[in-house]
Image: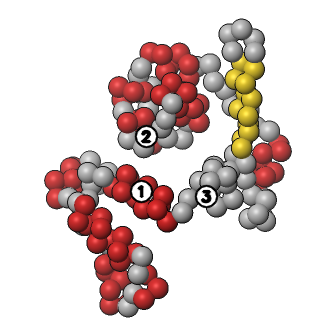
Amino acid sequence: MDPNASRETLDHSIMYIFAVALEDGAWHHIKSYTPQRAKKKSTINLWSKISTRENQKWTKKYHDTNPKNKCFGGKVIIRMKDGSIISDEINVADAHPSGKKPFKREQYIEKFRSLTQGIISKQESDRFLKTVQNLKRLKASNLKDLNIQLIPKKTIKRIKKSIF
């Protein structure tokens, strides 16, 4: 519940992520966690109104040993100012293999491109994706091609932020 928390801490706060998603109508793996976004007064206000509670039904689903029964979802209950309630639940994300709209190859490729944008070049992205999609025929001597070459200035920036 700390707007000054690190990105890694905010990423593990379902209350924060939910507040941002409600306000923005979307979630972004970088923009949703900037210090400015986390300190937005309306977000902090909404965030403080969100609570989580364990429900044994969901805990049991999460720990189920049968992959077909295992769930990573939950239930959301929103109480509006006028007293009305909006409630919904989902067992797994829509994109999950058991979800309503499971990701296909093109969605995984789009996600990869989104997550690596500005970190690797388009040429490197294309090269890597071509290699990965040929994985079954890849020879042991070509396993090195599964490594990604970062854009040099990003590499330098990351080294400066190293924990070592």
Q: Mark 1 points at which residue?
A: 110
Return the residue nearer the eye: 140 or 80: 80
Residue on which the image places disc 2: 28
- The answer to which of 63 and 80 lies nearer the viewer is 80
Lateral position of residue 111 relative to residue 116, left or right: right
**Classed neighbour count for the residue bearing mark 3: other residues with Cα under 10 Å, few (<14), some (14–19), many (≥20):** few
Q: On the rendered structure, is 75 left or right of 162?
A: right
- Quadrant containing the C terminus is bottom left
Rendered position, 68 above or below 62: below
Question: N-terminal of the two: label 2 or label 1?
Answer: 2
Q: What residue type is labelled 2?
A: His
**Amino acid type, mark 1:** Glu
Residue 154 visible in the displayed image = yes
Q: Is residue 60 left or right of residue 154?
A: right
Locate residue 162, reporting x and y percent.
28, 52
Q: Which of marks 2 and 3 is in front?
A: 3
Return the residue at label 3: 102
Q: Estimate how packed mark 1 is, as few (under 14), some (14 to 19) or many (20 or more) residues with alpha carbons within 10 Å.
A: few
Q: Which residue is drawn at 67% across and 52% down?
A: 100
Question: Where, by quadrant of the figure, is residue 55 drawn?
Answer: top right
Q: The residue tagged with tag 1: helix, strand or loop? A: helix
Residue 112 falls in which quadrant of the image?
bottom left
Specify which label sits upstream in the sequence, 3 or 1.
3
Report x, y in % for residue 49: 62, 19
Vertical order, 70 against 59 (above or below):
below
Tally of marks: 3
Q: Can residue 159 be seen in this view?
A: no
Residue farthest top in this picture: 82
Q: The disc labelled 3 sits on which kind of residue?
A: Pro
